[in-house]
């Protein structure tokens, strides 16, 4: 099982100043339907991956493409002794890439779960994001099956 599960998504308050507020004035605003997790994802944060050791999901609001910029995420992970970071979510070519790069800069071992990320740019945006991650060498690209197999090996 994972030692921590982090939910980091845009959660921009009315007084927050971020690089994204001018680009996307209506995206990620606190308590709007577009900023909330869909019910299936909310349920997943309390599912099997964390239930076996009473690990709960921790919400880290983000204000930029990267979950590490202007947030306590790196310190939180270090405080809990986390060295390996597995990324899932959207958008492969923006947020996932930026988060992978910043996690790499912060000296975490980074894995992007290829079939656990997507892009509003469709398949092309997704592939472009994966290509940038490969080009920068900031993360290993793995499949969900590989992650699950690794978790099962560790559990034995």
Image: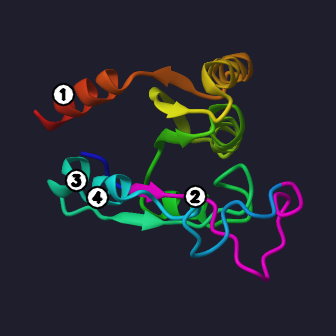
- Which residue sits at x=30%, y=22%? 145
Residue corresponding to mark 2: 9
Name the side, left or right, on which 84 lies relative to 110. Answer: left
Residue found at the far left of this picture: 156
Sequence-earlier tag: 3 or 2: 2
Using the image, determine if residue 124 lies above or below residue 22: above
Q: Is residue 52 above or below residue 99?
A: below
Horizontal side of residue 2 vs 107, given as left or right: left
The residue lying at 62 percent from left, 74 percent from top is: 30
Contact (CB < 8 A) between labels 3 and 2?
no
- Which label's residue is closer to the chain start, 3 or 1? 3
Quarter where residue 17 is shown: bottom right
Question: Label 1: few (<14), some or many (≥20) within 10 Å?
Answer: few
As for residue 108 lying within the magenta part, the answer is: no
In the structure shown, which secondary structural element does the residue marked by tag 3 occupy?
Answer: loop
Residue tagged 1: 153
Task: Give the labeled residue for mark 3.
Answer: 47
Residue found at the far bottom of this picture? 15
- Where the N terminus falls, by quadrant? top left
What is the C-alpha distance between the residues marked 1 and 4?
Answer: 25 Å
The answer to whether marks 1 and 2 mark residues whose Cβ atoms lie closer than 8 Å is no
Is 53 located above or below residue 83 in the figure? below
Q: Earlier in the sequence, mark 1 or mark 4?
A: 4
Q: Label 1: state its secondary structure.
A: helix
- What numbered label is drawn on residue 81? none
Q: Which mark is residue 43?
A: 4
């Amino acid at each position: 099982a994972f030692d921590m599960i982090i939910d980091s998504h845009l959660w921009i308050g009315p007084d927050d100043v971020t690089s994204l507020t001018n680009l996307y004035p209506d995206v990620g605003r606190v308590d709007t339907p577009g900023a909330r997790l869909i019910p299936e994802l909310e349920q997943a944060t309390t599912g099997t991956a964390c239930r076996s050791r009473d690990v709960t999901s921790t919400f880290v609001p983000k204000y930029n493409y990267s979950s590490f910029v202007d947030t306590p995420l790196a310190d939180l992970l270090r405080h809990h002794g986390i060295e390996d970071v597995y990324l899932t979510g959207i958008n492969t070519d923006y947020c996932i890439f930026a988060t992978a790069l910043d996690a790499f800069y912060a000296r975490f071992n980074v894995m992007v779960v290829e079939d656990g990320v997507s892009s509003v740019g469709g398949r092309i945006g997704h592939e472009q994001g994966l290509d940038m991650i490969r080009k920068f060498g900031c993360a290993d690209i793995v499949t969900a099956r590989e992650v699950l197999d690794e978790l099962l090996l560790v559990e034995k």
